[in-house]
């Protein structure tokens, strides 16, 4: 396996202090010993944190006061909300939060009749530089730690349970579609997925089927993910089926071409049995041509297989300073029809959170 070129490495900024969510369950006994506590104390702590979404040791009254104080060191405030905005009648809530070093990132919680989804960030900023995405314009600030990723999910789960979306709800879905390229922060993202999906007390107990990891198409990292045996949904941000345009829309295409990315997606689908999601932000007069819809349908059917793939069209969410806009409705409808005519499932994503710049590709914490 080739390693990722240097350009994908985050600047060497200090990651936050160690958090319980950073600790692999197999290492808990050692960490307890290091803190001078009996091994089972960390299991107790984990039951509160993962099982009840509690991060305040003072509420853990079954723990002796001295142990509470010591254990508090494993629950540093990694993700502190600084601004909450809501729209869609309270069903979409964006949180701007800051990290221990002042780094800012955003998460979005969305309620639906049958589920609640949180969209989390995996990096502060992003190094992939896709020209239509607000996050991509500022470059990469740093990777988020496993603890910072899990904390976004834990806080969302607690908020949903406590009625933030109207009625108490169980957080059922986690999508890595916030700021950052998750597969460029591979180790921490995979550890976070394990913490999110393991049943309590090792994790938050969210079904892996409800977790989606979205990537620009870092082929070696997709193959590595395939080998992890985690049945999460893989989403690939394709945005066009031809290399010429994709080289500009998704600059990493200069390194891994459309066909290579689709072949990696097929390997993922075959190994996991999970349908791969192809993300396609439809941009007026840029990538919305009928011939591109035909080529997309044909390529996906040939290279991945009709029943192993699903196209998710995202009407472009305009970002500040960009001339680009979403396609007119009839053009969008024709695009869907043509992809479906190739036998490939194709649906249009709802555009939650547009008014509060919380929709796909609009997250840019530094501008808030
Ligand atoms: N880096 C990952 C995940 C982050 S973005 C990735 O690229 O997949 C999640 C999705 O939103 C991606 O498909 C991305 O291409 C899309 N997106 C980015 N900017 C957008 C915009 N302005 N309008 C619509 N979708 C956008």
Image (cartoon, grey):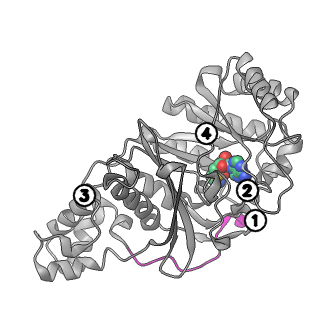
Write down the residue under mark 3: 52
* Circle count: 4
In the rendered structure, which segment of residues is drawn in magenta?
A: 6-18
Mark toward the start of the polypeptide (1 vs 4):
1
- Are dots 1 and 4 in contact, CB under 8 Å? no
Q: Position of residue 224 (x, y in %)?
A: 56, 47
Q: Position of residue 139 (x, y in %)?
A: 72, 68
Mark toward the start of the polypeptide (1 vs 3):
3
Mark toward the start of the polypeptide (4 vs 2):
2
Mark 3 → mark 4, Cα distance in angstroms: 31 Å
Q: Name the residue rendered at 71%, 27% in the picture.
A: 300
Write down the residue under mark 2: 133
Write down the residue under mark 1: 137
Q: Residue furthest front?
A: 89
Which mark is in front, 3 or 4?
Answer: 4
Can residue 118 be seen here? The reply is no
């Amino acid at each position: 396996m080739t390693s990722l070129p240097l350009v994908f490495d985050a600047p060497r900024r200090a990651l936050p202090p160690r958090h319980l969510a950073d600790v692999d369950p197999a290492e808990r006994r050692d960490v307890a010993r290091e803190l001078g506590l009996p091994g089972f104390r960390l299991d107790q702590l984990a039951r509160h944190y993962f099982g009840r979404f509690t991060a305040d040791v003072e509420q853990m009254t079954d723990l002796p006061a001295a142990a509470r104080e010591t254990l508090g060191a494993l629950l540093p405030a990694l993700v502190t909300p600084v601004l909450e905005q809501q729209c869609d009648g309270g069903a979409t809530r964006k949180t701007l939060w800051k990290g221990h070093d002042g780094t800012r990132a955003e998460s979005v919680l969305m309620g639906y009749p049958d589920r609640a989804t949180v969209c989390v960030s995996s990096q502060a900023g992003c190094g992939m530089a896709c020209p239509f995405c607000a996050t991509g314009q500022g470059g990469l600030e740093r990777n988020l730690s496993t603890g910072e990723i899990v904390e976004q999910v834990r806080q969302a789960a607690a908020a949903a349970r406590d009625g933030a979306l109207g009625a108490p709800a169980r957080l059922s879905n986690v999508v890595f579609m916030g700021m950052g390229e998750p597969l460029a922060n591979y180790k921490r993202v995979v550890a976070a997925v394990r913490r999110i999906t393991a049943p309590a007390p090792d994790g938050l107990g969210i079904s892996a089927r409800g977790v989606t990891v979205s990537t620009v198409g870092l082929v070696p990292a997709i193959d590595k993910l395939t080998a992890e045996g985690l049945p999460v949904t893989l989403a690939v941000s394709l945005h066009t089926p031809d290399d010429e345009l994709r080289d500009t829309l998704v600059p990493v295409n200069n390194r891994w071409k459309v066909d290579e990315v689709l072949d990696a997606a097929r390997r993922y689908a075959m190994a996991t049995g999970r349908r791969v999601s192809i993300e396609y932000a439809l941009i007026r007069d840029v990538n919305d041509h009928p011939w591109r819809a035909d080529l997309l349908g044909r390529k996906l059917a040939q290279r991945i297989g009709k029943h192993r793939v699903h196209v998710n069209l995202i009407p472009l969410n305009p970002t500040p300073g960009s001339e680009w806009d979403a396609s007119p409705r009839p053009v969008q409808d024709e695009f869907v029809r043509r992809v479906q005519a190739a036998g490939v499932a194709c649906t249009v994503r709802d555009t939650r959170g547009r008014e509060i710049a919380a929709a796909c590709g609009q997250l840019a914490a530094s501008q808030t």
